[in-house]
Amino acid sequence: ALDAFAAAVESTPNDAQARHRFGAALVQCNRLEDAEEHLSRAVGIDPSMTKALILLGDVTIKLGDPDRSLGVLAKAQAQDPDNGEIHRLLGAAHEELGDLDNALACYEKALAILPGNPAVSYSLACLLEKSNTLEQALAAVREGLKSAPDDFGLKLIAPKPEFRSGEHTAALAMLDAMPVDDTIPLDLQRDWCFEMGRVHDRLGDSDAAFECYAQGNDLARRLWRSETEGKAVMLGYIEDHLKTVTEPWVSTWSAPFDGTDER
């Protein structure tokens, strides 16, 4: 299919539809850099291609450029204001930028448009879990599982209350019951491995924990390479940290613990 699309855009380089379809195929093959190029060309040729804008917004988030994603998705939203997927991706971009209030508002808007949608429920539940509002996160999980009882992402959040309450054996049983194969997206496979590693660690099984963490790290490396190959994303990541880790900021840190008890 990629060869056919490549031939199509070579013979008709100003065909926005061909560029869009080529970009979509490249996304499925995890060639995000190439996908970004063709999707950008598609919306440059035809700015009214809402689907291409949405996909480009998703790709730019995954490539570590949420600021650009917000701009792209704003154009898509202007064309289709009641599209739930646009609101979900806007939430993801805001979350990536650390703007959790706006992220939450976008996810809630998306869920109002697409009630029970598993992707939206998962995004909302993850944000709520990170914000330590676990009951609300589980409510979002339960709502999503009503329409998608086998959704892997939603089921991955369900054991978190057991883990937090110290019921590590119960959490392990829930995670162990989840079938993990190549049909599961790599990022969810990675997250499952890390969750299994945490549970095994708490149960004192260091060998199993190490194996799970090693598998998770391998998946994380595969994801990093596929999402950043050919682009200086790592340099941008370092630049952002250099702007944050300044002497004035470090001077506000507490003194390191030296082992003495001052009470």
Image (tube, rainbow, N blue to C red):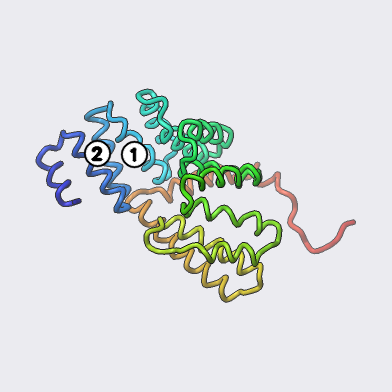
The residue sitting at the front extreme is 146
Q: Position of residue 101 (x, y in %)?
A: 58, 33
- Disc ID at residue 20: 2
Q: Quadrant of the C terminus?
A: bottom right
Residue found at x 23% / y 41%: 21
Q: Which sits earlier in the primary sequence, circle 1 or circle 2?
A: 2
Q: Is residue 15 left or right of residue 64?
A: left
Q: Is residue 52 left or right of residue 169?
A: left
Residue found at x 35% / y 24%: 79
Residue found at x 29% / y 53%: 29
- Label 2 crowd (10 A; few <14 / some 14-19 / many >=20): many
**Nearer to us in this view, 74 or 147:** 147
Q: Position of residue 179 (x, y in %)?
A: 46, 63
**Nearer to us in this view, 23 or 224:** 23
SS at badge 1: helix
Instruction: Give residue 251's quadrant in the image.
Output: top right
- Disc ID at residue 55: 1
Q: Is residue 43 left or right of residue 187?
A: left
Q: CA distance from mark 1 to mark 2?
A: 9 Å
The residue sitting at the left extreme is 11
Instruction: Give residue 104's quadrant in the image.
Output: top right
Report how many numbered discs are placed on residues in the image: 2
- Label 1 crowd (10 A; few <14 / some 14-19 / many >=20): many
Instruction: Say if 263 sits above or below 136 in the image.
Output: below
Q: Position of residue 11 (x, y in %)?
A: 9, 41
Identity of the amino acid at label 1?
A: Leu
Identity of the amino acid at label 2?
A: His
SS at badge 2: helix
Residue found at x 53% / y 46%: 242
